[in-house]
Amino acid sequence: MLQGRILTPGGWINGSIAFDQRIAGITEGPVGEGLTIIPGFVDLHVHGASGVDIMEGGDAGAVVARSHARHGTTALLGTTLTAKEDSIRHALQGLAGVIAQRPRHGARMLGVHLEGPFLNRRRLGAQPPDVVTGSRALVESYHAIAPIRVLTMAPEVTGHLELIPHLKDMGIRVQIGHSAGSYDDGVAAMRAGAAGFTHLFNGMSGMSHKEPGMVDVAMAHAEYAEIIPDLLHVHPGAMRAALRAIPRLYGVTDATSATGMPDGEYALGTQRVFKCMGCVRLATGSLAGSVLTMDQALRNFVSLGMEVAEASQRLSLFPADYLGESQRGRLAPGAWADIVVLDQSLHPVAVFVEGEAIPLS
Ligand SMILES: [Zn+2]
């Protein structure tokens, strides 16, 4: 049982929350210390942490799930990079084990975000150039190894538009990303069933009033899109524009293996990347994922003037709802006891994943 200011789907309640693996009840009552209790974070775009990349396969997913849990993430999607087919299979085999059994002291791995290889080679960002055209057979063979929940694709690549309804039927959320497509390409993709946008603004055709691109599609039509709130990938001004336009804009980290590590050289799939001054770059200087954690994302949102309740929704409730996870991302009786306790400076002082207390140091 915990006491404090508790964020429920109906708003703040002063009182106590009782739980084992699931939340038993929330009761109003007197509170002592001024602790803030919010739902655990749900991060739908995670490549790594603590020097380990999901593409390494094996136990990498467990290391990543433990590392992010210490920052309040209670559920996540292991995110693969564009790579040769056998490397992707190797990463998926590793993830399958972590998805089947939650690692002790780790966040729940809900499935896979397949970020590539079905991308536009002109908008690769930090992704290696091993792009291929997507096919139903290839996605089904990946899906048979580990459940794909989110798939990023460039819909303008020949053959991809026709693929979208099949992916949707498989229960996969199709996201537009790493795309050079036009406004019309994006609208067609959404009509075909694409539901989201991958790291909005980054790796896609930008806003233009004469030649609109994918950012315009998101602003004009999307209910959901992911964004990286590290205040480096997207300027606060552009973030504010997106917040006004996209009702359920939600934060992801896009965290790499350099997260939680000292400055230096790290792997991002087959690429070498360099961590320095709070960001990760290729040798060319372009941004290559982040070193963001979800608790920092919360503080960054709040630094833009956002209320804690809204910042929490954009890091827990909205991504959970987007994925159809109605028992996560919220503090309500019956839901999983995925809980973060924050001090007054919004740093986690306790984290629970499905009721298990996570050691924070
Ligand atoms: Zn990514």
Image (cartoon, rainbow, N blue to C red):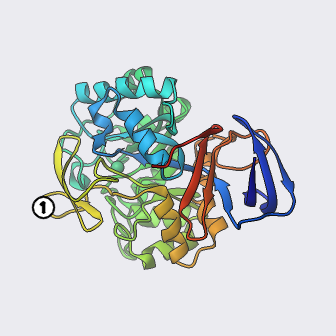
What residue sits right under mark 1 in the picture?
284
Q: Is residue 127 visible?
A: yes
Q: Nearer the viewer, residue 208 or 286?
A: 286
| Quarter of the rendering containing residue 128 | top left
* Image position of 301 (left or right of 132): right
The amino acid marked with disc number 1 is Thr
Looking at mark 1, is its residue's CB closer than 8 Å to ligand 1?
Answer: no
Q: Is residue 8 visible?
A: no
Position of residue 21 measured from the top left corner of the image (x, y, whole percent): 69, 34
Q: Nearer the viewer, residue 181 or 106?
A: 106
Neighbours of disc 1 within 10 Å: few (<14), some (14-19), many (20+):
few
Q: Nearer the viewer, residue 191 or 324?
A: 324
* Image position of 114 (left or right of 308): left
Name above or below for residue 232 compared with residue 70: below
Residue visible at 32% across and 46% down in the picture: 50
Position of residue 115 measured from the top left corner of the image (x, y, whole percent): 35, 43
Position of residue 69 measured from the top left corner of the image (x, y, whole percent): 49, 45
Secondary structure beneath dot 1 equals loop
Residue visible at 45% across and 47% down in the picture: 68
Q: Nearer the viewer, residue 45 or 249?
A: 45
Q: How many marks?
A: 1
* Image position of 56 (left or right of 227): left
Position of residue 344 measured from the top left corner of the image (x, y, whole percent): 61, 70
Name above or below for residue 221 compared with residue 67: below
